[in-house]
Amino acid sequence: MANIKKRIGIVGIGGVGGFIGAPLAAFYAHRPEVEIVFICRGETLQSIQQQGLVFRSAGQEQTVKPALASDDPAAIGQLDALFICTKSYALAEVLHTYSDCIGPDTLLVPLQNMVHAAEVIRQVLPAKGRVLEGCIYVVSNMAAPGVVEHKGGPGKVYIGGEAPESAAWLVKAIRAAGVDLSFSHNIKEVLWQKYLFLSPVAAVTTAYQVTFGAIAADAALLEVLHFMMLEINALASATGVNLPEESVATAKALLTKFPAESKTSMQLDFEQHLRNEKPFLVDYVLAKAKEAGIPAVAYEQVNEKITALYPALG
């Protein structure tokens, strides 16, 4: 890193942001080469400023403090890299709010549950920053403001995109802190492979009010999941991303890699009657399938169940 301090921001210190931010803040607390900035607001910001971020994983608890925790773009200043760990619906808003923290060479790493984050970023910031799309496989939730619990999942982070050479320092810095991160030169395939898993599972857990384990143990639900995954596979192909033959089988097998009691974040948001990611995980599929002329019968049926179950939110 050539002895020049790099500044890495993490915006959205919830389940994902906390999972990534905690090891980074701990590792670089007394190392001058990297400064870690937590960008959050409200009670979460207040809690972190007062006592630090409490992170729980594998029966262990640690409290970490970043170099800076703030929601003020002027105080944050320009960043060398920004991990965007908010919910999908907040991506555009975050980019508008923190535009002044993003320079022409700032590496932007969205970790939303979507396959078109780069398009959203370029709609908001046509020329600013260098986009490195990404995704993460993890079950991690905010237990309370400033308290994050890692509950399971591989914890694997993938990034890739338009600036592989300029991202080398970031990959090195993240790995040094113990985060399992890989750079992929075919990130679109990686994103769609995750979406092939996440979108159907989020929809089914929400529509049928079940956990990962309940799906894995129910032949009828597995069949619904299977057909939804086939529809995602077809949609990926229509966008020019041809997933491996075994993609559906791999995605179904992944269901058992998480704790049986796991729920998707979309499901949890519906249960708490909160704003949710259905527009990005279900509605997006239906709209794009219609555009491409691809049948999405399984998605339509599950969408109807969600709408009937949560008429005010679905």
Image: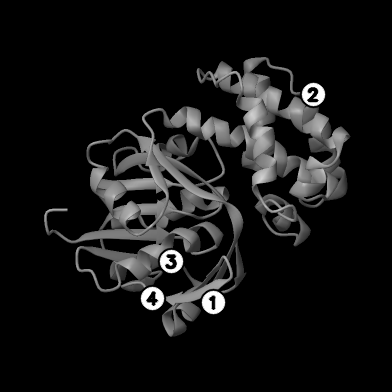
Front tag of 1 and 3? 3
Q: Is residue 276 above or below residue 28?
A: above
Residue with the mark numbered 1: 43
Secondary element under disc 3, as helix, strand or loop, is helix
Front position in the image: 204 or 70: 204
Mark with earlier residue (3, 4)? 3
Residue where numbered disc 3 is placed:
22
Query: Which of the marked residues, 1 or 4, is nearer the chain's N terminus?
Result: 1
- State whether residue 288 appears in this view: no
Task: State which mark lies toward you, 1 or 4.
Answer: 4
Number of numbered discs visible in the structure rendering: 4
Task: Report the residue that reaches farthest toward the bottom.
Answer: 50
Judge left or right: residue 133 versus residue 232.
left
Q: Residue at x 57, y 74 (%)?
A: 145
Residue 120 coordinates in the image, percent (x, y):
46, 39
What's under tag 3, amino acid-wise?
Ala
Mark 2: give few (<14), some (14-19) or many (20+) Cα within 10 Å.
few
Mark 2: secondary structure: helix
Taking the spot 48% from the left edge, 80% from the top edge, the residue there is 46
Q: Residues within 10 Å of mark 3 (few under 14, many from 20)?
A: many
Using the numbered discs, state the Cα–Cα distance from disc 3 to disc 4 in whole angstroms.
Answer: 8 Å
Give amino acid for label 1. Glu
Q: Residues within 10 Å of mark 1 (few under 14, many from 20)?
A: few
Looking at the picture, which amino acid does disc 4 mark? Lys
Distance (Cα) linking label 1 and label 4: 16 Å
Question: Nearest the camera: 56 or 209?
Answer: 56
Upstream in sequence: badge 2 or badge 3: 3
Name the residue carrying label 4: 65
